[in-house]
Image: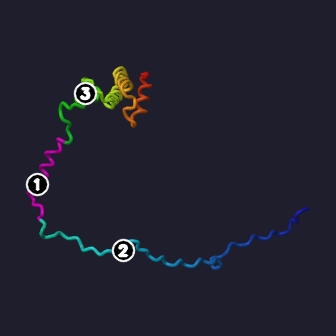
Amino acid sequence: MRADPGATIPAPPLPPVASDVKTPPEPASPTPVRLVPRVETPELTWDPRWRRVSAGEMVGAGLFAAAALPFAIIPPLGSSYNTRSGFDESARNALRLGTPDALLHFHAAVVFDAAGQADRARDEIGTVLAGNPWFSARYHDQALALAQKLGVTR
């Protein structure tokens, strides 16, 4: 079937004009819902019976803060936390005296392992596993993982 060269093709229908489109009705304004009953509170004002801060007290508080600030910022000299493996002196003394506290030995093993002292960490985790492998429900799995990492058997 051949198309007639002189035939015209009908045009598609035009889109609707603005006057043909029906607009939806305006929604009704929502009714406000109050979940908490409104309580009228009195306006907050300064009670004249209360004493106000004087200028001298403000200056004194400022001087005190300025004097205390360096103590908060600068660490004390000779702090026990500046030791080589990060342990404080009381923990070192407890380990030196042979404490039976397995949790302290476990934490010592973790610190020594983090400090790169594998032989000391191996000794401490060995002490934990030999004494009481269930020393802590919280740290038991970590202790076994550290022992495996260090090559310590029960």
Relative to 49, 92 lies left or right:
right
Report the mark closest to the observer, 3 or 2.
3
Q: How many labels does the image show?
A: 3
Residue 94 is labelled as: 3
Q: Nearer the viewer, residue 44 or 65?
A: 44
Question: Mark 2 is on which residue type?
Answer: Pro
Q: In which quarter of the image is residue 58?
A: bottom left
Q: Nearer the viewer, residue 110 or 28?
A: 110
* Magenta-highlighted residues: 51-71
| Sequence-earlier tag: 3 or 1 | 1
* SS for callout 2: loop
Where does residue 26 sit, x and y in percent of width and height?
54, 78
Where does residue 139 sit, x and y in percent of width and height?
39, 34
Label 2 with label 1: CB-CB less than 8 Å: no
Question: Mark 1 is on which residue type?
Answer: Val
Q: Where 4 falls versus 104 (above or below)?
A: below
Where does residue 99 sit, x and y in percent of width and height?
27, 27
Estimate how packed mark 2 is, as few (under 14), some (14 to 19) or many (20 or more) residues with alpha carbons within 10 Å.
few
Relative to 117, 29 lies left or right:
right
Q: Residue at (65%, 78%) from the top-left corner? A: 20
Report the mark closest to the observer, 3 or 1.
3
Q: CA gap, disc 3 to disc 2?
A: 62 Å
Report the quarter where the C terminus lies: top left
* SS for callout 3: helix
Q: Where 150 falls versus 77 (above or below)?
A: above
Q: Circle 1 sits on which residue?
A: 59
| Sequence-earlier tag: 2 or 1 | 2
Q: Residue at (86%, 68%) from the top-left corner? A: 6
Question: Mark 3 is on which residue type?
Answer: Ala
